[in-house]
Image (tube, grey):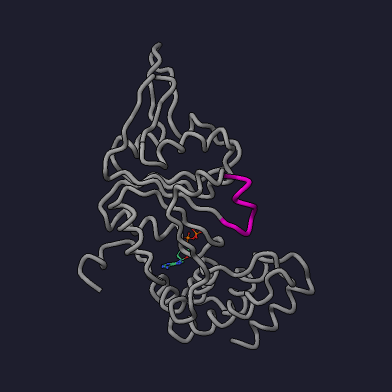
Amino acid sequence: MTEKDRELPYYEPVGNEIDLFERAWRNHLPLLLKGPTGVGKTRFVVHMAARLGLPLYTIACHDDLTAADLVGRHLIGEGETYWNDGPLTRAVREGGICYLDEVVEARKDTTVVIHPLADDRRMLPIDRTGEMLRAPDSFMLVVSYNPGYQNFLKGMKPSTRQRFVSLRFDFPSAEVERSILVGETGCSEDVATRLVDIGRQMRVLKNVDLEEVASTRLLVYAARLIHDGMDPVEACSAVLVEALTDDEDVAEALLEVIRASF
Ligand code: ADP
């Protein structure tokens, strides 16, 4: 770990993603991160923004999000209207990173504003002011989506998708996940090993008994509570069982796995 790494938001690399991100950025290519929730996509973007020394604007997409929420709108103040940049516009003006989290949640008429930014025009037209912004070299568009939630092809035109360099995130290997738990929470190697083992046993149940399985995020929560002195079975019950199922039989079966591990 270098001196520089020490100052950056903690991120444990799982493959060549840091190199790929830097190359995409240098070559003005937008990046698509895909993978289940809680596996480090957001943390990765935060880390990379700090590593490259760029401002980061993150937008959590949802179906009420309008183009004006991204680009900006006129506001009224002291009897006058004035223009207020949205986060996408700010990122373009400042040459920073704009991260649209869960981009397929946004309506198509909203995501259409990113199209001219996602190809080699790298333009952002602001219809309401008549401005046409050209993104500076350091600007980067990053979007994420969770393929488990819905069909991305339905949510974003293939022609748009093909403008992105894509990077797949998945649950990390046991070794990397242990390092994440220790690095994030300061828990012991022993606790980390047991939690990672429980997580892996639970992930096998995906689509059998559980719709959603324990993400790295949830294992971090459990490690944090245990490190704080909470009984491990109680901590896992709250974080890994009740958060993932309402079915009492499934909950009892999961608790058995946890009791056998602690
Ligand atoms: P996503 O954006 O994929 O839903 P996040 O980036 O919010 O997931 O990750 C959730 C949490 O999991 C983070 O806050 C962090 O504690 C932990 N985490 C997951 N992967 C990593 C990693 N590679 N390095 C460091 N922390 C990680």
Query: Total of numbered circles in the picture?
Result: 0
| Residue 152 horizontal side relative to residue 142, left or right | right
Q: Position of residue 107 (x, y in %)?
A: 59, 37
Q: Which residue is located at x 70 percent, y 83 percent?
A: 256
Q: Where is residue 83 in the image (x, y as percent from the top left)?
A: 38, 22
1 and 193: which is toward the camera: 1
Q: Which residue is located at x 40 percent, y 27 percent?
A: 125
Q: With respect to residue 191, does 125 lie above or below?
A: above
Q: In which quarter of the image is the C terminus?
A: bottom right
161 and 253: which is toward the camera: 161
Q: With respect to residue 117, does 245 lie above or below?
A: below
Q: Is the magenta stretch mostly helix, strand or loop?
A: loop
Residue 129 sits in quarter: top left
Magenta segment includes 154:
yes
**Residue farthest toward the top in the current orientation of the protein:** 79
183 and 5: which is toward the camera: 5
Q: Which residue is located at x 52 percent, y 71 percent?
A: 171
Q: Where is residue 8 in the image (x, y as percent from the top left)?
A: 29, 62
| Residue 254 horizontal side relative to residue 26, left or right | right
| Residue 23 horizontal side relative to residue 111, left or right | left
Q: Which residue is located at x 46 percent, y 44 percent?
A: 59
Residue 43 sits in quarter: bottom left
The part of the chain drawn in magenta is 146-156
Q: Position of residue 138 (x, y in %)?
A: 27, 45
Magenta segment includes 15:
no
Q: Quadrant of the N terminus?
A: bottom left
